[in-house]
């Protein structure tokens, strides 16, 4: 499982089962033939249908059925509908409605309306099934409920034992989970035949929510396990949700409420599959100024922890990177997270909150680059001025690429910055062996266009295209799926497919 950390090796499988291409959430995809020269001619495919019903926050997934060999895009919407689209034509293969989504008026706060499926599902290739959390207005009058579904990928049928009502399942264990104040934004994960779902609160931090991770065994969905923050708040809400390095799961938490002593907020946690809480400083990290971060809502919960394996002579240095809404990057020892204040290195890398998923590129020579959306604090004329001249733009950088090193001492520095015209979550594509690395990002909420840059130099290779390449309805945090030779991007009511020349 350790190879899952290397973008050049993790995406060779035809199917994309996880958010950002792998359990590690690295955002690395192998795209044979997608060189910088071909990327310059990438364009939206006008023949691709891609029409669905509902706003889309979750990343689509890709499945190539071993039964039919038909490539499918799996798409989940806020209307509580799951679609399988033919990945070549964009036509609907099957459609499954899971219930009525929840109106904003039925919630104490929030910014998604209606609220249905927000977190990215996960596919289990062994069972040929897709799993997801849907916020549903229950037909029995009990109000908003979190229902976890398992669906057969080939036809959308509901699997035996599903759906699981999370509040009811936890109540049977003597635990209180209040679904109306809990939201599910983060990507789901499957580890050791168990489905793991992260939960946080709604936009506005209303009500007595907690950060939760709930585990549901795929072969016995009626027995659940759970971990939660001790204090109120501390939501696990990053779009990347849970990251997994082949040995442990990692989550980051947001701000807790009125905690005078540290009570699990502003933190990175290592979790085992039993979800038992650990008190060892090896299994958690929080900045020394966690209370200030709590009070100012500048938490670590906006991005998932990113595992990084750096080649080190004959071995590997095992690191993890956390990015905060305080604009700081925290580099941690993955085998000993260090407790409060125990980071190996801390660097101010952005002048604004970092709240989208990062992407990792491990170069063939062993160097590590990490791309994220943010207003880089290290983006001076040396890293951004030439790019600004090339683009003819006076706007500031909104894409930052960090260089991570382990020797002679752990360090974080800014490699280059770019302008992507908005706020999407970047990915990295390479050809075989890690060659031709390209950072891709969508200008969500800005120009709503696709942008590409050489990962090693920052030189732009695609700057949005022409009139037919513009997109509409791109939601905050939107990322890109690279599969089947194309880039797929989700907007409201449709999926866009970009094809290289």
Image: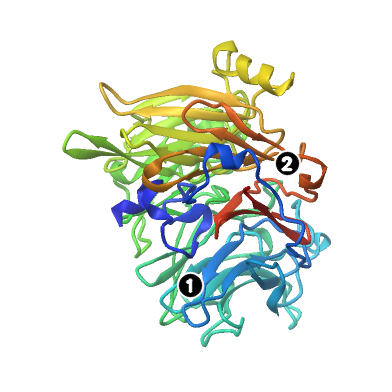
Q: Earlier in the sequence, mark 2 or mark 1?
A: 1
Q: Whole-percent x and y of residue 355?
A: 60, 40
Q: Whole-percent x and y of residue 477?
A: 65, 46
Residue closest to the far left: 314
Q: In this rendered view, identify the residue nearer to me: 120 or 73.
A: 73
Q: Mark 2 vs mark 1: give the one in front.
A: 2
Residue closest to the far top: 381
Position of 277 relative to 391 (above/below): below
Residue identifier under label 1:
174
Position of 98 relative to 375 (above/below): below
Q: Which mark is residue 449?
A: 2
Residue at image coords 44%, 79%:
127
Q: In this rendered view, identify the residue nearer to me: 166 or 191.
A: 191
Position of 232 relative to 70 (above/below): above
- Left or right, 174 with respect to 111, comes to left
Residue 303 is at least partly visible in this image: yes
Assign a secondary structure to mark 1.
loop
Q: Whole-percent x and y of residue 129?
A: 51, 76
Q: Whole-percent x and y of residue 238?
A: 56, 48
User: Could you give the CA–CA distance between mark 2 and mark 1, rounded to whole angstroms?
Assistant: 48 Å
Q: In this rendered view, identify the residue nearer to me: 407 or 472.
A: 472
């Amino acid at each position: 499982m350790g190879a899952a950390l290397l973008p050049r090796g993790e995406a060779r499988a035809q199917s994309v089962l996880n958010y950002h291409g792998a359990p590690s959430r690295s955002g690395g995809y192998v795209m044979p033939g997608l060189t910088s020269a071909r990327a310059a001619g990438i364009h939206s495919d006008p023949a691709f249908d891609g029409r669905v019903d509902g706003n889309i926050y979750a990343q689509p997934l890709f499945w190539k059925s071993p039964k039919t060999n038909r490539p499918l895009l799996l798409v989940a919407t806020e209307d509580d509908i799951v679609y399988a689209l033919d990945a070549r034509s964009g036509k609907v293969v099957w459609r499954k409605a899971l219930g009525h989504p929840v109106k904003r008026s039925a919630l104490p706060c929030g910014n998604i309306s209606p609220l249905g499926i927000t977190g990215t599902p996960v596919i289990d290739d062994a069972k040929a099934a897709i799993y997801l959390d849907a916020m549903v207005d229950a037909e029995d009058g009990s109000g908003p409920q979190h229902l976890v579904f398992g669906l057969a990928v080939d036809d959308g049928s509901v699997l035996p034992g599903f759906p699981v009502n999370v509040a009811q399942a936890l109540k049977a264990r003597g635990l209180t989970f209040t679904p109306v104040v809990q939201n599910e934004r983060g990507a789901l994960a499957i580890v050791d035949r168990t489905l793991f779902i992260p939960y946080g609160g709604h936009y506005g931090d209303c009500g007595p929510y907690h950060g939760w991770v709930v585990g549901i065994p795929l072969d016995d969905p009626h027995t659940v396990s759970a971990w939660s923050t001790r204090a109120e708040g501390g939501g696990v809400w990053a779009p990347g949700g849970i990251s997994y390095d082949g040995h442990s799961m990692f989550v980051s938490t947001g701000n807790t409420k009125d905690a005078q002593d540290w009570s699990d907020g502003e933190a990175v946690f290592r979790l085992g599959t039993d979800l038992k809480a650990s008190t060892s400083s090896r299994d958690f990290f929080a900045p020394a100024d966690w209370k200030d971060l709590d009070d100012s809502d500048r938490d670590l919960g906006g991005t998932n922890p990113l595992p990084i394996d750096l080649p080190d002579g004959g071995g590997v240095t095992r690191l993890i990177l956390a990015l905060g809404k305080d604009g700081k990057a925290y580099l941690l020892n993955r085998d000993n997270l260090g407790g409060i204040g125990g980071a190996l290195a801390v660097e101010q890398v952005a002048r604004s909150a970092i709240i989208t998923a990062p992407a990792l590129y491990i170069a063939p020579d062993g160097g590590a680059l990490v791309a994220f959306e943010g207003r880089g604090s290290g983006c001076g004329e040396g890293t951004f001025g030439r790019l600004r001249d090339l683009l003819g733009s006076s706007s500031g950088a909104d894409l930052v690429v960090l260089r991570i090193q382990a020797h002679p001492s752990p360090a974080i520095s800014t490699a280059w910055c770019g302008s992507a015209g908005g706020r999407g979550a970047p990915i990295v594509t390479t050809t075989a062996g890690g060659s031709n690395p390209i950072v891709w990002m969508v200008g969500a909420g800005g120009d709503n266009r696709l942008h590409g840059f050489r990962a090693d130099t920052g030189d732009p290779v695609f700057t949005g295209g022409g009139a037919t390449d513009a997109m509409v309805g791109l939601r905050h945090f939107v990322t890109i799926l690279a599969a089947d030779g194309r880039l797929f991007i989700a907007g409201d009511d449709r999926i866009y497919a970009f094809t290289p020349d």
